[in-house]
Image (spheres, coloured by chain):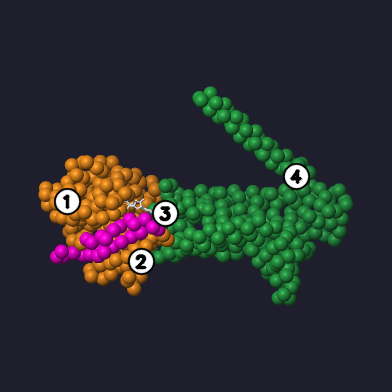
Amino acid sequence: MRKTLKIEERFYRVLMFLSTTFICSALFVILFSILRTGLPHLSWEMISEMPHGGYYFGKSGGIFNAIVGSVYLSLGASLLAFLLGLPIAMFINIHLIRLTRFVAVIRFLLDLLWGVPSIVYGAFGFTIMVFFGMRTSLMAGIITVSLFILPIIVRAMDEVLRNVPKGLLESAKSLGSTNSEIAYVVYFKQCLPGIITAWLLAFGRAIGDAASILFTTGYTDFVPHALNEPAATLPLAIFFQLSSPIPEVRERAYAASVILIFIVLTVSVVSRILSNRYNKNKINF
Amino acid sequence: MQNSIIDIKQLNLYYGKQHILKDINISIPAKKITVILGPSGCGKTTLLRSLNRLTELDASVKISGEILLNGQDLLNSTEDVTTIRKKMGLLAQRPYPLPMSIYNNVAYGLRISGRRKKKFLNSRVEYYLRQTNLWDEVKDRLKEPAATLSIGQQQRLCLARGLAVDPQIILADEPTSALDPHSSRMIEEKFAELKDSYTIVLVTHILRQAKNIADHVIFMYMGQVVEQADVREFFENPKEQQTKAYLQGQFY
Ligand SMILES: Nc1ncnc2c1ncn2[C@@H]1O[C@H](COP(=O)(O)OP(=O)(O)OP(=O)(O)O)[C@@H](O)[C@H]1O
Ligand SMILES: [Mg+2]
């Protein structure tokens, strides 16, 4: 008995070790190949300048427009999704606490939506735009992307809120708190680190997605100055450059990927710092 | 009973099909300590939580009967449930401080009642922390998270936080079960002082604790109230066979 247990234990340890190594090396290889191709082509010009005429055929210029467009788009969309999503997550965990079946259905639907490919959201957004006679714009992109990341941010926050012990809810209720006080004071403070992480997850999905913005945000060689103007974005900049027959341009796509990764990394580090900062009041039950 | 603040009449409670509280009829005297005694699983916690209507958070609960507070029915009240809950402070089996500073934990109850003046809050927070013998231990670290306190201190903080809502009644569900003997005694002594101003309903299964601080005892068994009596009467001259058996330690 003891012996078989020991062998089993060893077996799983080896298995875990192998899978961890495999995953980490796969990620490392991806990152390495992007950096190896991209870094030599990364220049200050690329980050700071607009595409000059013929940029996509290998001439001079940069993708400042796409960097700014992507940041606008994903900040806007993740903010909008957050503002819509937080009340939903609070509502199903606090106000609807008695309706366990109904909440289970909502969770199920959100999980389904999570699995819908982003191109479908793009097509949906496009249909709506056509219906209202809107043209491709930053606004249309923000709305479409926020719909696409809404299930993600809601479920991510939901999982955090769900783990709040019932005793905390009950003691807040016993003090005579209303549901909104519980949501936006007690639960918000208790879950703030997790809420920030959920936002980060949504931001990452928003900035990395190309399909949902293809028809809705459009593409332009300028920085958008208003919500009704089209905007360039990094995923599309990468996509257009990668589909070029000119090797030089294809390699610039890797440099654009490096920029994208760097933005996600920066946002991630900043939110980690914020998250740790707001962690101190959290009660660990 | 004369001077009763809570009267429960024909209270029945079901969890789904399970009949948990059966025909409960009791009175709780004002400004006294009433102890609810009984073996594990007999429904003490459920009865206590019915008083401030926490049981209704559970969808499967069905409840009937009357719970009268000062003659006014709480179960079928038109009054807002938050108003009802503010009349009672609940001290749970283990402390659940709010995820904020020590100061804000106590100020929370005042703030949700609309009191926001800094000076007023400061003086009340100090008052309630003194009431629970916590002030000297925390006065230099009021801004620190409540999570940094020991369990015994957290329980006293929860008591202070509950008192700050200015309830008439304190409901306490085995409030000392997670505490060391010293902290337990502190809470017990506090209750003995607090009964001049509050009505206290305490669930325990520590007979010594009941004997020490109770004025009135309610003994429950399998969802029913077997006996309720004055503390002397209850311990010296129990009427029911089951009570005698319980007091002799024949079951827990
Ligand atoms: N949420 C619930 N759902 C279903 N049944 C429950 C629930 N809570 C309590 N019960 C049942 O109600 C009965 C009474 O439970 P209760 O917690 O009131 O007992 P208690 O007297 O406080 O016991 P203890 O001394 O162990 O705390 C038990 O049989 C328990 O299984
Ligand atoms: Mg109990």
Q: Is mark 1 within 8 Å of ligand 1?
A: no
CB under 8 Å between discs 4 and 1: no
Question: How far from the left and from the top, in percent, is residue B166?
Answer: 28, 63
Q: Is residue A143 left or right of residue B77?
A: right
Q: Which residue is mark 1?
A: B240
Q: Which residue is mark 4?
A: A34
Label 2: few (<14), some (14–19) or many (≥20) C-alpha neighbours in 10 Å:
some
Callout 1 secondary element: loop
Q: Which residue is mark 3?
A: A166
Q: Please report the residue visible at 57 percent of the width from the left and 65 percent of the height from the top.
A: A84
Q: Are marks 2 and 4 on the same chain?
A: no
Closer to the eye: label 4 or 1? 1
Can you tell which quarter of the image residue A180 is in?
Answer: bottom left
Q: Which kind of residue does numbered mark 4 sit on? A: Ile
Q: CA distance from mark 3 to mark 1?
A: 37 Å
Callout 2 secondary element: helix
Mark 2 or mark 1, earlier in chain: 2
